[in-house]
């Protein structure tokens, strides 16, 4: 499996609406980060679709987290 494009060097802190469905960009190529805009088409990547519990969260921007779509600190270990 190829590596996703790194979309940022730190998580994006964002307020999510409880019960709303989101599609997190897993490939890193979306122009609507951290959300999917379909840029993954033709690649091996697919977005991570999830229903938010609500509140402020840290969404991964390095695209290498072990807890997609949420940041687990991997960005600090994989800085380019």
Image (spheres, grey):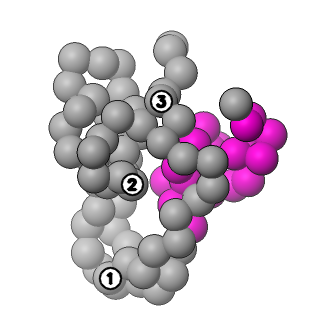
At numbered mark 3, what does the secondary structure look like: helix, strand or loop? loop
Give me the residue at 49% from left, 54% from top. 69
Give above or below for 76 relative to 21: above
- Residue 10 placement: quadrant: bottom right
What secondary structure predominates along the stretch shown in magenta?
Answer: loop
First in sequence, mark 3 or 1: give its number: 3
Circle 2 residue = 34
Give above or below for 60 relative to 28: below
Q: Nearer the viewer, mark 3 or mark 1?
A: 3
Between 67 and 4, the one nearer to me in the picture: 4
Q: Is residue 53 left or right of residue 73?
A: left
Q: CA–CA distance between discs 3 and 1?
A: 27 Å
The span shown in magenta is 58-79
Between 57 and 53, the one nearer to me in the picture: 57
Check if residue 71 falls in the magenta segment: yes
First in sequence, mark 3 or 2: give its number: 3
Q: Is residue 7 left or right of residue 80?
A: left
Between 32 and 3, the one nearer to me in the picture: 32
Q: CA–CA distance between discs 3 and 2?
A: 12 Å
Q: CA–CA distance between discs 2 and 1?
A: 15 Å
Residue 3 visible:
yes
Q: Is residue 59 left or right of residue 80?
A: left
């Amino acid at each position: 499996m190829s590596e996703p494009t790194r979309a940022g060097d730190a998580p994006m802190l964002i307020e999510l609406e409880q019960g709303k469905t989101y599609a997190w960009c897993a490939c890193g190529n979306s122009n609507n980060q951290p959300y999917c805009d379909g840029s993954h088409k033709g690649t091996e990547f697919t977005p991570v679709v999830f229903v938010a519990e609500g509140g402020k969260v840290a969404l991964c921007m390095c695209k290498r987290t072990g807890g997609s779509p949420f940041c687990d600190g991997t960005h600090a270990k994989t800085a380019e």
